[in-house]
Image: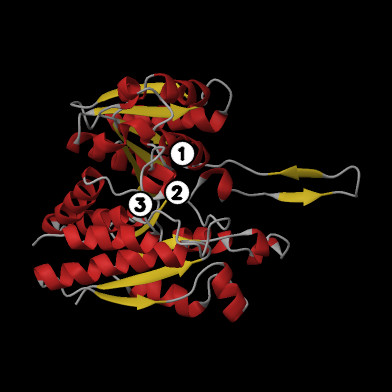
Amino acid sequence: MPTIAILPGDGIGPEVTDQAVRVIEKLNELFDAQFTTELQPVGGAAYEMHGHPLPESTLSLAKSADAILLGAVGGPKWEAIDRQLRPEKALLGLRSELDLFSNLRPAILFPELADASTLKPEVVSGLDIMIVRELTGGIYFGGPRAIEGEAGNRKGYNTMVYTEPEIERIAHSAFRMAMQRDKRLCSVDKANVLEVSELWREVVIEVGKSYPEVELSHMYIDNACMQLVRAPKQFDVIVTTNMFGDILSDAASMLTGSIGMLPSASLDSNGKGMYEPVHGSAPDIAGQGKANPLATILSVAMMMRSTFANEQCAAAIEAAVKQTLADGIRTGDIAASGEKIVSTVEMGSAVVERLIG
């Protein structure tokens, strides 16, 4: 039976993953899917229990499971501890240890939420973008890195590094994604300033020769940020580096009305993946039943499609979410003025009730 590792994490992570597990259990009931789930702590929660944000038991489960569902990690409680023991190191460790180099972040606007976006409906209506972010290289992993010197004269530095093979494999991932969509790919870099971006652009162009059907374009990161809020529907698939992808995907989240609506997948070369909402741990609302679980539930849909090749389950989840929104059910982050607001559990229940076999 396929095993899904459930890593709830911190803040609202346990609340939203609880609702996603309910969806998985409903899939088992409707489709005899036979998914099993196993729980392990990660991030700050794991640090409190084991003295490390990514204990061996958690890493072992992540390696042995067929897929991973992560909630969120981090919070102000752990900001003062040693950098190597902070919750975020668990996230970087999982990506590195499992070689999850290809991060897929869709930004899709459900028609029912057109008014929830801060942009005009005509600008975002029909939005459907896929951001492909390189996830295990770049400035977040490069060395040397340090803070050095005496107080009053310290310096901090990080190193952005990419090798040709790293760029090639993420480029192939993005081109393959473009082939499944509208066959348009925009590569985002800063080649006018950074040598690493010069190499990035050269390699992407070379890889593109193997995908003649895909229209390849290039854009500097600063212009891409502007264009994303000016005319987002010009994009189909965007491929970019770790740091630039981090920035662009969070910006894209607000086009859809709420960061609570966006799922993500981080995949290795064989399709095994870690799936998570992009919203983070949101400690300010943790434990209050205010969190929107739809991004986590939609991450399960991505899991069904990308790792398990189970289109039936993926489509059922997406249809249930769409129907839930069509029925006017809203958590606070996507509710218009005067609309009734439901809790995290109530939103999860609404989706489960609308799952149809």
Circle 2/circle 1 CB separation < 8 Å: yes
What residue did someone put label 3 on? 295
Quarter holding the C terminus is: bottom left
- Up the image or down, 194 lies above or below 295; here it is above
What residue did someone put label 1 on? 245
Looking at the image, which residue is at 51% across and 65% down? 287
* Nearest-to-viewer mark from 1 and 3: 3
Res. 47 image quadrant = bottom right
Q: How is the image coloured?
A: secondary structure
267 sits left or right of 92 in the view: left
Res. 238 image quadrant = top left
Image x and y of residue 11, in percent: 53, 62
Image x and y of residue 5, in percent: 35, 71
Q: Residues within 10 Å of mark 1 (few under 14, many from 20)?
A: many
Q: Nearer the viewer, residue 276 or 237?
A: 276
> Which amino acid type is marked by label 3?
Ala
> Which amino acid type is marked by label 1?
Gly
Q: Which one is earlier in the sequence, the residue at label 1 or at label 3?
A: 1
Image x and y of residue 33, in percent: 14, 71
**Residue 330: which numbered mark, if any?**
none
* Nearest-to-viewer mark from 2 and 1: 1
What residue did someone put label 2 on? 135
Q: In this view of the protein, can residue 285 be seen by the observer?
A: yes
Q: Secondary structure at mark 3?
A: helix
> Which amino acid type is marked by label 2?
Leu
Q: Residues within 10 Å of mark 2 (few under 14, many from 20)?
A: many
Looking at the image, which residue is at 32% across and 57% down? 347
* Nearest-to-viewer mark from 3 and 2: 3
Circle 3/circle 2 CB separation < 8 Å: no
Q: Secondary structure at mark 1?
A: helix
Q: Which one is earlier in the sequence, the residue at label 2 or at label 1?
A: 2
